[in-house]
Image (tube, rainbow, N blue to C red):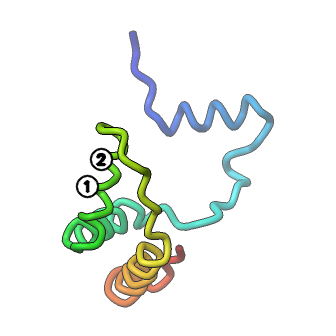
Amino acid sequence: MMEVPPCEIERSALLLIGLDPLKLTLLRSEANAELKNDIMMLVLRSSKWYVEYADRLDAYRTAGEPMPPYPTERVERVETLVDELIRESVDPSHVR
């Protein structure tokens, strides 16, 4: 069986629903998505508050403990800083 590259599958799916992939505009930059994710996870996994959240989440999933609230504000602050870092050092046109 011939393997089809993911980009061809995505293009085919768009065409199937009547959208021309060449005329679509991305709503956000995907160019730095992997870099951003790597930096975000490095920072989060190095943050005591996030590690504690992850431990409580694991206890919720495995031991039926109460579900911890997601630290939205703190994660968003980290994301904002990572976005700024990418803009300053990698890609000035980077957008969230």
What x and y, as percent, mark residue 29?
53, 67
Place residue 2 in its image quadrant: top left
**From this viewpoint, is residue 6 visible?**
yes
Per the image, the residue denoted by label 1 is 55
Left or right: where 92 falls relative to 60: right
Examine the rendered structure and indicate whether residue 88 appears above or below residue 27: below
What x and y, as percent, mark residue 13?
65, 32
Left or right: where 63 falls relative to 32: left
Q: How many marks?
A: 2
Residue at the front extreme, as displayed: 65
What x and y, as percent, mark residue 82?
37, 79
Residue at position x 19%, y 71% in the image: 46
Residue at the bottom extreme, as displayed: 88
Residue at position x 49%, y 70% in the image: 72
Relative depth, front residue between 33 and 8:
33
Relative depth, front residue between 93 and 37:
37
Relative depth, front residue between 89 and 21:
89
Left or right: where 20 falls relative to 76: right
Examine the rendered structure and indicate whether residue 66 appears above or below residue 82: above
Q: CA distance from mark 2 to mark 1?
A: 5 Å
Residue at the right extreme, as displayed: 18
Residue at position x 28%, y 72% in the image: 49
Q: Which mark is residue 58?
A: 2
Residue at position x 25%, y 55% in the image: 55
Under tag 2, what secondary structure? helix
| Contact (Cβ within 8 Å) of mark 2 with mark 1 | yes
Relative depth, front residue between 7 and 33:
33
Say what amino acid the circle numbered 1 marks. Answer: Asp
Say what amino acid the circle numbered 2 marks. Answer: Asp
What x and y, as percent, mark residue 51?
24, 64
For label 1, the crowd category at 10 Å Cα-Cα, with few meaning under 14, some 14 to 19 and many 20 or more, is few
Q: Which mark is residue 2?
A: none
